[in-house]
Image (cartoon, helix red, strand yellow):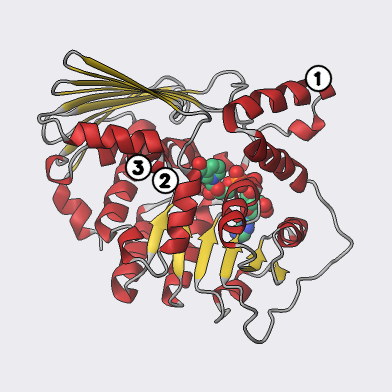
Amino acid sequence: MDDYTRQSLLVRSRKVARYVRLYGLFRTIAKVRAHYHMNNEYPETASLPVPAGPTGKHVGILGCGKFAYANVAYYVHQNFGAVIRGVMDTDLNRAISLAQRYRADYYTTNADDVLNDAHIDLIYIVSNHASHAEYAIAAIRHGKAVHIEKPPVVNLDQLIRLCTAIDEHNGRVRLGFNRPESPLVRLLKQQLDAQTGPAMINWFVAGHAISPDHWYFAEEEGGRILGNLCHWIDFTLRLIPAPSRYPVQIIPTRSRQSDCNISVSYVFGDGSIATITFSAKGHTFDGVRETLNVHKGNLLAQLTDFRTLRFDIGPVVRHHRLWFRDHGHRRSILDSYLMRTDKSKQETGAMIRETGHLMLKTREALETNTVMTVTAGFSRSLA
Ligand SMILES: NC(=O)c1ccc[n+]([C@@H]2O[C@H](COP(=O)([O-])OP(=O)(O)OC[C@H]3O[C@@H](n4cnc5c(N)ncnc54)[C@H](O)[C@@H]3O)[C@@H](O)[C@H]2O)c1
């Protein structure tokens, strides 16, 4: 989250060298460009008009920050060419910068331009957290497919309205929970599903240090449980087979803060137990660090930083190592593009309800420091 463009040449060089090893040259270049993109300035003072007719491009982006630039637009453009038609950000410079780099037809500071654009059939929502559900509901009502970056909602009212919009308009939606799309996780899931009985799941996550004035911490944006922990909450939920999940007991462990340097445990209906420990102390030079240990039946698995995976299955030991970290961003963003025509890529309404509800209840449990229980009935009755 640091602005590396303002660091010394030595720090910038070391960061780039490290990231080339972790993510490869091209991903690193995209990430570096995204940091400079945030500070680009242009003489233009107004949005461009929406072209009246079709131009062959059909994708819209709401929110043109680092993630939109280095991941969403990057992968869409790399795989499908110049298909981005309209981009919007409340900051005109960011919208111009992204539009120019990825050859969009227009940039704007008015979300309605993109939402009302009849030639856009897919919108990626990559803006501040409080706006995700509002933009998604409007996009669904306009009949567009929607990729909603995490978190999909910041409160229960948004979750209910989002689920209602999906149900009423047959909304085509995918959530930006990319980690389940990582190739190592797909392997892990296969092996886990082959085992029976409850699982023991343990996450240790060292998150970025974020300055207290970062927008993630603004009251209306939902804080770090919704902004960051939602990734591992969602992932953990998906590791438990749907019929085995409820009731889920949420047990918080915290000190002074409710959303950093905390731990939260879940006891699922089938007796599976999961703990997520989220540490945010100093700076993590290699980005977010994540270790997952899982034990289920005869399977013992350890996943480290979405790059290495070790399985012990009885006497058999298997190691998998990727050249570069793969958190599943590419696949998640491309699947959202494909969802326009491939129904199998869409997220189910049930999953959106369940994951949204569990992350909101987790935040409540940590804020109030009380044990909470989520039941299937409540999750189902949301919409
Ligand atoms: N899936 C992942 O792994 C992952 C990783 C990083 C960020 N993200 C998500 O991507 C989104 C953007 O994060 P980022 O890191 O790019 O942040 P950022 O601060 O770099 O960018 C946010 C952008 O949104 C713009 N914005 C603010 N309010 C807006 C509004 N109401 N409408 C439109 N634009 C608005 C800001 O001007 C800024 O350009 C967040 O939802 C974040 O949680 C996801």
Q: Is mark 2 within 8 Å of ligand 1?
A: yes
Secondary element at tag 2: loop
Mark 2: amino acid: Phe
Q: Position of residue 251 (x, y in %)?
A: 26, 28
Q: Which mark is residue 359?
A: 3
Q: Look at mark 2 in the image and give the residue it sits on.
A: 177
- The mark nearer the N terminus, 2 or 1, is 1
Secondary element at tag 1: helix
Residue found at x 48% / y 41%: 227
Quick check: 360 above or below 46? above
Q: Is mark 3 within 8 Å of ligand 1?
A: no
- The mark nearer the N terminus, 2 or 3, is 2
Q: Is residue 220 left or right of residue 158?
A: right
Mark 1: amino acid: Leu
Quarter holding the N terminus is top right
Q: Residues within 10 Å of mark 1 (few under 14, many from 20)?
A: few
Q: Position of residue 80 (x, y in %)?
A: 57, 62
Residue found at x 17% / y 34%: 268
